Amino acid sequence: MDLALFDFDGTLTTQETFPRFLRCFVPAERQRAARWALAPLVAGYRLGLVAGTRVRAEVVQRGLAGADEAAFNAAARDWAARELPGLLRPQALARLRAHRARGDTVLVVSGNFEVLLQAFAAAEGAVALGSRLESREGRLTGRYAGPQCVLEEKVLRVRAEVDTGTFRRIHAYGDTREDRPMLLLADVAHYLPRGWPATLDPARID
């Protein structure tokens, strides 16, 4: 049996779902205030001068601090059930299902909110490992609970979930530099910065 590791946003989906969900959840007035404050960071990120982890941390702080945890979790699950089906790459989903059909263990490992991915992953026979948010007395603090699930943290989370040494081979799929440590962990790595290439047959797993 093999282990298959899938990044989510941009790998299994056609676009980033983190901002799309937050635009639906965060009140419009709060979004407007945050947009001006975050503009320099976003510009720096697009120029490659600011890390994505810093931008996401600021977005979470400005958008979610004080939000009701139960309401956030419910909104994330509802949004995922409603919106994710139309955002998934058919070829990538077919590859995930091909792994499951072979009996492989499949983990969806993402910097996105874990709660957003859990129902999708469970429905596909996979396990979601994602970023978690800190809360106190039922309210989000605006901080992550531990490191964001990117870069080396992806590998740490995978190893905490499964014993990687028990698998015949490890396959990994990702589309950004934040997936690089996970790709390096794999015996068979697929780097997909431009989406799923037509030459990669979803049903043929080498």
Image: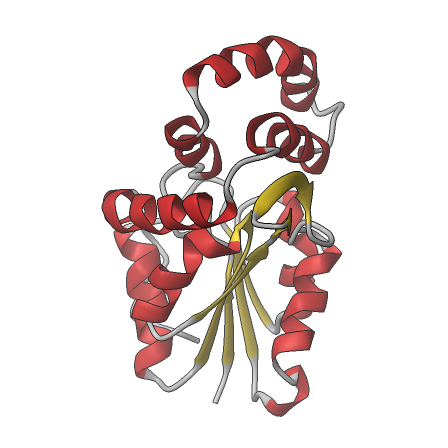
Which color scheme did the rendering employ for the protein? secondary structure
Foreground residue among 39 and 92: 39
- The answer to whether 161 appears left or right of 71 in the picture is right
Q: Name the residue at 36% across, 70% down.
A: 122
Q: Can residue 75 be seen in this view?
A: yes
The one nearer the camera, 46 or 116, is 116
Q: Where is residue 40 in the image (x, y as percent from the top left)?
A: 69, 12
Quarter assignment of residue 120: bottom left
Residue 66 image offset from top left, x and y in percent: 59, 34
Instruction: State the residue at coordinates (62%, 52%).
Output: 179
- The picture places residue 53, in percent across and down from the top left corner, at 69, 38
Relative height, residue 123 to residue 162 (above, below): above
Indicate left or right for 134 with 25 as reference. Answer: right
- Is any atom of residue 196 visible in this view? no
User: Looking at this view, is 197 or 179 the one in front?
Assistant: 179
**In which quadrant will I find the C terminus?**
bottom left
Q: Residue at x 37, y 86 (%)?
A: 103
Q: Where is residue 145 in the image (x, y as percent from the top left)?
A: 69, 52
Name the outermost residue toward the front: 137
Give the quadrant of residue 23: top left
> Which quadrant of the figure has residue 82?
top left
Q: How many labels does the image show?
A: 0
Looking at the picture, tell me which residue is in the foreground, 44 or 70: 70
- Of all residues, the one furthest to the top in this rendering is 36
